[in-house]
Structures are given as C-alpha cells and as structure tokens.
Image: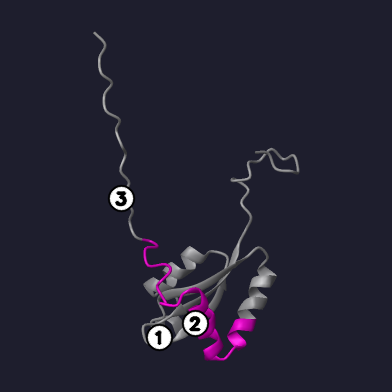
Amino acid sequence: MPMPNGGGICESMAREKQYHVYIMASITGVLYVGVTGFLVTRVLQHKSGQTDGFTRRYRVHKLVYYETFRYVNNAIARETEIKKWQREKKVALIDAQNPTWMDLAADWGKATVMRRQIPPPHAASE
C-alpha cells in the first residue's frame, strides 16, 4: 500500500521508529530503568553482560516491564519520571502489568527451529 505522501514506499518498509522505556530486574530485586530505540538489542546486551556498570555489577538481566513511544523526547521524559520515583511506585508499575515478574524477554536471542512442511505428492492420474 503506497504511503500517503505519494512516495510509493510500502508501509511495512517504512516502519516508524519506536523508542522504549524499560525496567530490568535482578533475581534479588535490584531495578534498572533505561531508554532505547532498539529494545531487543539492548536487552540482549544486558543479558549477556555486554553493558559496563550497574546492570553488569548487579546482574540485572530480566526484562520485567517496558513501554513504547513514537517520539524519543516522550520516551526520555517518561524514563526521567520513572527514575525519580521511589522503589514502591516502580514495583507497583511492574506489578500492574506483570504481577509474576516474568522475564518478558526469556526467549529473545535463542535459536529458533524452523520446519518446512513438504506437501504430500499428488496422486497420479491413470
């Protein structure tokens, strides 16, 4: 489907950029709030210990919450807001969307087995 601007580019090819505010947690309950334009990549960096500093030191590897924004300034403002909150308010935010604190990225980055279904051969006409 052509874009409204007449550029002839398919909508799926011209995906809008998205920004994410996310909260990571350690198994001991340490929380980290961040913002990124590439959520999957950033979370995998945290999980693999590629990030220096706080998240590596405290083993903050579990994605427990995230929000998506169209504009980076809105995402940065939300990250700033959440970072100023007391721990109890952050926990309530997570609990409201993810009461079990399940790792929302548990399967990210793992190999996926793809199987191709081969249709049965057609019966030969006699």
Query: Which of pointers 1 and 3 lies earlier in the amino acid sequence?
Result: 1
Q: Of the residues shown, which amino acid type is indicated by label 1?
A: Tyr
Q: Which residue is mark 3?
A: 113
Q: Is residue 88 magenta?
A: yes
Mark 1 vs mark 3, foreground winner is 3
Q: Residues within 10 Å of mark 3 (few under 14, many from 20)?
A: few
Q: Is residue 13 magenta?
A: no
Q: Of the residues shown, which amino acid type is indicated by label 2?
A: Tyr
**Judging from the image, what secondary structure is the residue with disc 1 in?**
loop
Q: Residue furthest top?
A: 126
Q: Position of residue 73 (x, y in %)?
A: 69, 71
Q: Which residue is mark 2?
A: 32
Quarter of the figure with residue 35: bottom right
Mark 2 vs mark 1, foreground winner is 2
Quarter of the figure with residue 56: bottom left
Residue 50 is at least partly visible in this image: no
The region drawn magenta spans 81-109
Q: Position of residue 83 (x, y in %)?
A: 59, 85
Residue located at (32% from left, 46% from top):
114
**Judging from the image, what secondary structure is the residue with disc 2 in?**
strand
Residue 54 higher or lower than 62, as above or below:
below
Q: Quadrant of the N terminus?
A: top right
Looking at the image, residue 4 sits to the left or right of residue 38; the answer is right
Q: Are marks 1 and 3 in contact (CB under 8 Å)?
A: no
Query: What separation in Å lies between label 2 and label 3 (alpha carbons)?
Result: 32 Å
Q: Which residue is mark 1?
A: 58
Query: Which of pointers 2 and 1 lies earlier in the amino acid sequence?
Result: 2
Query: What separation in Å lies between label 2 and label 1 (alpha carbons)?
Result: 10 Å
Q: Of the residues shown, which amino acid type is indicated by label 3?
A: Val
Q: Are marks 2 and 1 in contact (CB under 8 Å)?
A: yes
